[in-house]
Image: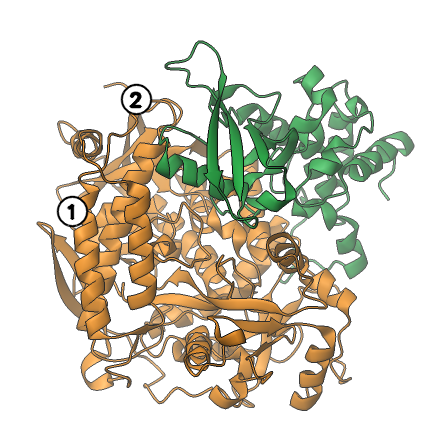
Amino acid sequence: MQVTLRIFRYNPEKDKKPYYDRFQIEADPTDRVLDLLEYVKGQFDGTLSFRRSCAHGICGSDAMRINGHNRLACKILVKELSRKITIEPILGMRVVKDLIVEMEPFFDSYRKVLPYLINDETPPKKERLQSPEARLRFDDTTKCILCACCTTSCPSFWASEEYVGPAAIVTAHRFIFDSRDQAGAERLRILSDQFGVYRCHTIFNCTVACPREIQITKAIGEVKKAIAIGKIE
Amino acid sequence: MTNYHQYDVVVIGAGGAGLMAALYASKNASTAVLSKLYPTRSHTGTAQGGVGAALGNIEEDHAEWHTYDTVKGSDYLGDQDAIEFMCQEAIQAVYELEHMGLPFSRTPQGKIDQRPFGGHTNNVTGKPVPRACFAADRTGHMILQTLYQQCIKNNVTFFNEFHVLDVLIENGVAAGAVAVELATGELHVFHAKSVIFATGGHGRIWEITSNAYSFTGDGVAVTLRRGIPAEDMEFFQFHPTGIYRLGILITEGVRGEGGVLINDKGERFMEHYAPKVKDLASRDVVSRAMYLEMREGRGIGGKRYLYLDMRPETVNKYAALDGRKRPDGSPYVVTGEELLHKLPDIVDFNRTYLGIDPVSQMMPVQPTAHYAMGGIPTNKLGQVVIDEQNNVLPGLYAAGEVACVSVHGANRLGTNSLLDLIVFGKYAGLEAAQYANGVAFQSLPADPTEFTRQQIDAILQADGEEKAFEIGKEMKSVMFDEVGVFRTAEGMGHALEKVRELRERLKHVRKVDRGKVFNTELLNIWELGNLLELAEVTTVSALARNESRGGHAREDYPKRDDQNWLKHTLAWMQDGEIKLGYKPVVITKYPPKERVY
């Protein structure tokens, strides 16, 4: 089938402002959008720049705005889209070149929530025990691949870059509700400030955008509740 | 000099091995990690089924059994001292990951859960033993995340999106590395006492692969160009179950949970090839069986794929026939819900890419290029060894898939790659820091970026008609057909000719982007050059080895030949020519015998 790609272009060394390139190509309905980008780069324009690595939705490199929705280019097939496909960088981050955005601020927010297990007790010789139920409590939020699809789909983030954003809260949730962790209170304190969870207005864009199908809005709600009742349950 | 940095230890690559090395090196020495990707994008994250360690949480198990299984899995080409070391270390290493916060799946008693995997057996009964410690089907993802989190906690210094193009060796000692910063195109010199390569594998040589775009063999290519040999490059693993045509990995954990391979006649054909462990034989054995089935016309609809069936009714039928039991002695019976819970990503991949639900439909699979057993030769402390006598190059280290210790020999067992990362990453990091603390910095060459610039300029000066995209496609195709699961002298001869032609054609690519910012075209061509070089080394090494062993199956030499070939290949690149040498295999407790599953 014939598809038309409309791709956001911006080369800081050449362009005063961004523009869109169009490519008409023959595609298979089961092609990934990433396959089309690779094809365009390989056949027509080597300067087209985007990040990618694993190509099957695990490494989180290729978050893009595809027909207005945040997606991983490797996890959306042509048949799921119209024959006109518009590909743009994710919103709310500085565009470095074409579809590549500056990711450091995103990882800064991630680092703010103490994204590591904190437990000062000497561990046992073997594993710490954790019941399957306790493990299940935070299972969903361990799936996060830090692709930024959620954070950059969030109107509250667009309005204020200081908002730590859904991805950082997902990471915080993964530790707050881990029975082995001891720093939940500290993380709740961090997330209760003006750039924390209360910036979330339950718009659900994040949940829709998540390529890992994490129930992000629910996770944020659980963190809000823990702050409100002063208890992690 | 601008863009000059100095660290005691420089780690190249930020996957499991690199992060583990960085964690341990940074405890005792100033350490920087250089990675062409953001660390969490590394390929470790795609590992699914588990990390092997004889915890015995489900059934009796011993590190000695793990050792023997690994030796046997390696088709006796693995170095037994290193294998024993790895399997002994495994248990503590897995507990350490748990202590770091890794969210393993749990048994009802709250212990780390374990599942059976190919080639891992109870050495008394010969039956599969649950040895793979897992976090659902995203164990690699959880290892990568946990190690990165620990690096943040420990303030490890990262240079993200810095692509290393050269290693500096002065007076026979490591002196540093040269990297291009992707965001600016600037070259950076990292002056270091120790350099650790942890850059992963090179599966992108082959058409059907589970490997990431970034798996372009950078570490082996860079060291080859600096006179360091590559070991056992003819041994590359084809994983039995890649999604048809896409190559995306479907974990062996599916078969661990009871899934079976089915041919066009509806038969569970592995019964004929591995009567004892059936679908849980070693990967090389299963991949060959699949090719033989397809050759006999029993591919699905006569095509080049078979079915992997994990529908509960199938799993339960064969579990009953095999007499498989739960730990409490009850018959092994699964529900769709349980499989969905244990293998959520497998379900997701199938829905996304094939539109099928593996709990009610069978998955079309074919062998997919998966793992490099070969690589930069090292000893069990991660030190790079550069000749037949295992002499060390001081200050140079390698760990993970880029390295060849060799613990995997001619065929790696599933779950031993993640184990390799954490054990040898740790020791490489410890050793690199200890070495650095005892020596002074080597002086740098007068022009440390000279060789890097030569390589870049050669690409930028090209002004031909060739498309790198097409050259890459032709390489992948010929390597998959001729240097794949089965090989012949004739086919490999043809592949070698083709690869040499492609290397020549790569010098005549059309004009390349000259921009500085994220010039991915330039770097992709440099990476393709690496792949072509490694494809040639692989083929030359494979052509010379006139026997079949593990992942190297010669139709013209179908038998293993211990008399002549119980030895490791070393390949050097000298003035563009490949020179081969050999070194003995370390055998301690397990003399080679016939390998039957």
**Nearest the camera: B314 or B597?**
B314
Residue A42: image location, x then y, percent: 36, 38
- Is the Cβ of the residue at disc 1 closer than 8 Å to that at disc 2? no
Cα separation, mark 1 vs mark 2, equals: 33 Å
Residue B286 visible (yes or no): yes
Residue B569 visible (yes or no): no
Labelled disc at residue B504: 1
**Nearest the camera: A146 or B188?**
A146
Residue type at mark 2: give it.
Asn
Q: In the figure, B390 relative to A39: above or below? A: below
Residue B139: image location, x then y, percent: 59, 57
* Label 2 Cα crowd, 10 Å radius (few <14 / some 14-19 / many 20+): few
Residue type at mark 1: give it.
Glu
In-image side of B501 versus A6 (left or right)? left
Chain letter for mark 2, please: B
Residue A81: image location, x then y, percent: 63, 39
Chain letter for mark 1, please: B
| Quarter of the C terminus of chain A within the rendering | top right
Chain A's colour?
Answer: green
Q: Are marks 1 and 2 on the same chain?
A: yes
Labelled disc at residue B3: 2
| Colour-to-chain, orange | B
Instruction: Identify the residue at image location x=73%, y=21%.
Output: A155
Q: In the figure, B218 relative to B568: above or below? A: above
Residue A187: image location, x then y, percent: 73, 32
| Quadrant in which residue B491 is drawn | bottom left
In-image side of B114 versus B402 (left or right)? right
Instruction: Identify the residue at image location x=43%, y=51%.
Output: B17
Circle 1 SS class: helix
